[in-house]
C-alpha cells in the first residue's frame, strides 16, 4: 500500500460541501482507503486573484493502484462534480491534485509528483503540515513543517475555518 496526499480546493457554490463530497467520493474509489483529512482553510486565490476565495484542505489515503489510474479517478470525480476547465487557476467547483504519491518522483506529460508548486503554496503546506508535519518531501529532503517555516511572507492568506 502506498500513502498518497491529495490537495482539495473549491471556490464555487458551497465550497466546504464540495470539498467534503470530494473526500467522500475518493473514499469510495476501489483499492483506495481514506486515512486522514486536514481541517479546512479559507484561502486567498493565487494566480488569478479576481475571484472568490477558496476552501482548501488535504486528504491522505492508501492505495494499491498506479499513479496514472489514481489521476484518472480523481479527474473523473472532478468531472462528475461539474468541473469545467476554462482557465488556468480560474474558478472551479472542485480541484483535486495529487501532491505526493509515496516517495515517488514522477515526471510524465500529464502528471508531475511531487506537485511542482506545492512547496511554494501556503494553501497546500498549511494543511499538509497539520496532517503530517514530519513527512519528508521526496525531492527537497525537507519536512512539510520545515517547508512551511521557510515559506516567505508573500501575501498568501490562509485562515483556519471552523467546521460547519
Image (cartoon, grey):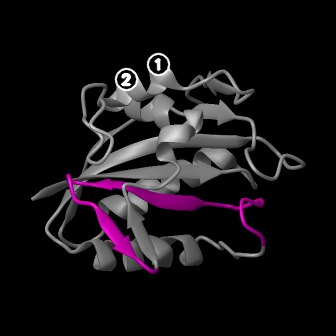
Label 2 neighbour load within 10 Å: few <14, some 14-19, many 20+: some
- Residue 35's quadrant in the figure? top left
151 relative position to 154: left or right: left
10 relative position to 90: left or right: left
> From the viewer's perspective, is residue 139 above or below residue 30?
above
Q: Which residue is mark 2?
A: 145
Q: Residue at x 77, y 70 (%)?
A: 87
Q: Residue at x 31, y 25 (%)?
A: 133
Question: Is mark 1 in CB contact (under 8 Å) with mark 2?
Answer: yes
Q: Which residues are magenta?
A: 87-109
Q: Position of residue 152 (x, y in %)?
A: 61, 24
- Residue 130: assigned label: none
> From the viewer's perspective, is residue 128 above or below residue 109?
above
Q: Who is closer to the viewer here, 163 or 78? A: 78
State the quadrant of the N terminus.
Answer: bottom left
Q: Residue furthest left?
A: 1
Count of numbered marks:
2
Q: Position of residue 65 (x, y in %)?
A: 19, 73
Disc 1 versus disc 2: distance between alpha carbons? 6 Å
Asked if the magenta segment contains residue 102, the reply would be: yes
Give the SS element for disc 1: helix
Q: Residue at x 53, y 50 (%)?
A: 117
- Residue 112's quadrant in the figure? bottom left
Q: Residue furthest right?
A: 50
Label 1 neighbour load within 10 Å: few <14, some 14-19, many 20+: few
Q: Which residue is mark 1?
A: 149
Q: Position of residue 164 (x, y in %)?
A: 60, 30
Q: Position of residue 39 (x, y in %)?
A: 47, 30
160 relative position to 131: left or right: right
Give the SS element for disc 2: helix
Q: Residue at x 48, y 22 (%)?
A: 150
Amino acid at each position: 500500500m502506498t500513502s498518497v496526499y491529495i490537495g482539495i480546493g473549491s471556490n464555487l457554490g458551497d465550497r466546504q460541501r464540495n470539498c467534503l463530497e470530494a473526500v467522500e467520493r475518493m473514499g469510495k474509489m476501489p483499492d483506495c482507503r481514506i486515512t486522514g483529512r486536514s481541517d479546512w482553510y479559507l484561502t486567498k486565490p493565487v494566480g488569478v486573484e479576481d475571484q472568490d476565495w477558496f476552501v482548501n484542505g488535504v486528504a491522505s489515503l492508501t492505495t494499491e493502484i498506479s499513479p496514472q489510474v489514481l489521476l484518472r479517478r480523481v479527474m473523473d470525480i472532478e468531472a462528475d462534480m461539474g468541473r469545467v476547465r476554462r482557465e488556468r487557476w480560474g474558478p472551479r467547483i472542485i480541484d483535486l491534485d495529487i501532491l505526493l504519491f509515496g516517495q515517488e518522483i514522477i515526471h510524465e506529460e500529464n502528471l508531475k509528483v511531487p506537485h511542482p508548486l506545492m512547496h511554494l503554496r501556503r494553501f497546500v503546506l498549511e494543511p499538509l503540515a497539520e496532517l503530517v508535519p514530519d513527512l519528508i518531501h521526496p525531492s527537497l529532503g525537507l519536512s512539510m513543517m520545515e517547508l512551511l517555516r521557510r515559506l516567505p511572507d508573500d501575501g498568501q492568506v490562509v485562515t483556519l475555518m471552523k467546521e460547519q
